[in-house]
Image (cartoon, rainbow, N blue to C red):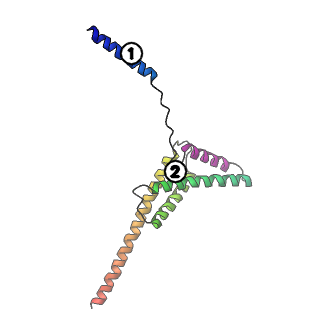
Amino acid sequence: MSDIENDIDQIIAEVKIFELTDVEEKPKKRKKKAGYFDNGEMIELFKEKYRLEALESSLDRDRKLERVKNKIGVLYLKVADGMMKRPNFANYPPSQKEDMISDALFVMSRAGDRYDVNFANPFAYFSQITFNAFRYSLKNMKKRTGLFVIVNHLENFDGFDDAGE
């Protein structure tokens, strides 16, 4: 029994030494993904936009407000481009992609006027808006394409009747 107890004591001592000499790992820095933005940056831009809009109109204020709105627009475009790379939107023709992105930018710009800066995650907010805008745009495109096919079918059907007589 004493040999076993000695072995256990030795193992415990080795574990304590290992715990003391264990090197602390440095937290890994996340790489900033291309096409996305920092939530804090977006919130600060919206706060600046609201602050400038509350001021009395002047040439300097209008220039600053225009710069802030342009930066916000660039961030909207990054969200739309990033969403377009998802597998469920990636294989559409370029013309449809451009239409989808323009629809999403329009909806995001309208929603940006109503954005509450107390909401801590603007990326999630605008990503969801973009996703819904893409789905709505695809729904309308499919509806237009379906009508086009029906009209062509009816025109061909009428032509067939005339040719058969």
Above or below: residue 95 compared with residue 55: below
Is 92 covered by the magenta stretch? no
Q: Position of residue 121 (x, y in %)?
A: 51, 44
Residue shown at 32% from the left, 84% from the top: 158
**What residue did someone put label 1 on?**
13
Give the numbered dot on residue 32: none
Q: Position of residue 74 (x, y in %)?
A: 57, 55
Residue shown at 35% from the left, 14% from the top: 10
Categorize mark 1 by other alpha carbons within 10 Å: few (<14), some (14-19), many (20+). Answer: few
Q: Position of residue 64 (x, y in %)?
A: 68, 52
Q: Which residues are magenta?
A: 27-55
Check the image and name the residue furthest to the right.
59
Residue shown at 54% from the left, 54% from the top: 76
Check the image and name the residue furthest to the top.
2
**In the image, what residue type sits under mark 1?**
Ala
- Compute the Cα span from label 2 to label 1: 49 Å
Q: Secondary structure at mark 2?
A: loop
Give the numbered dot on residue 34: 2
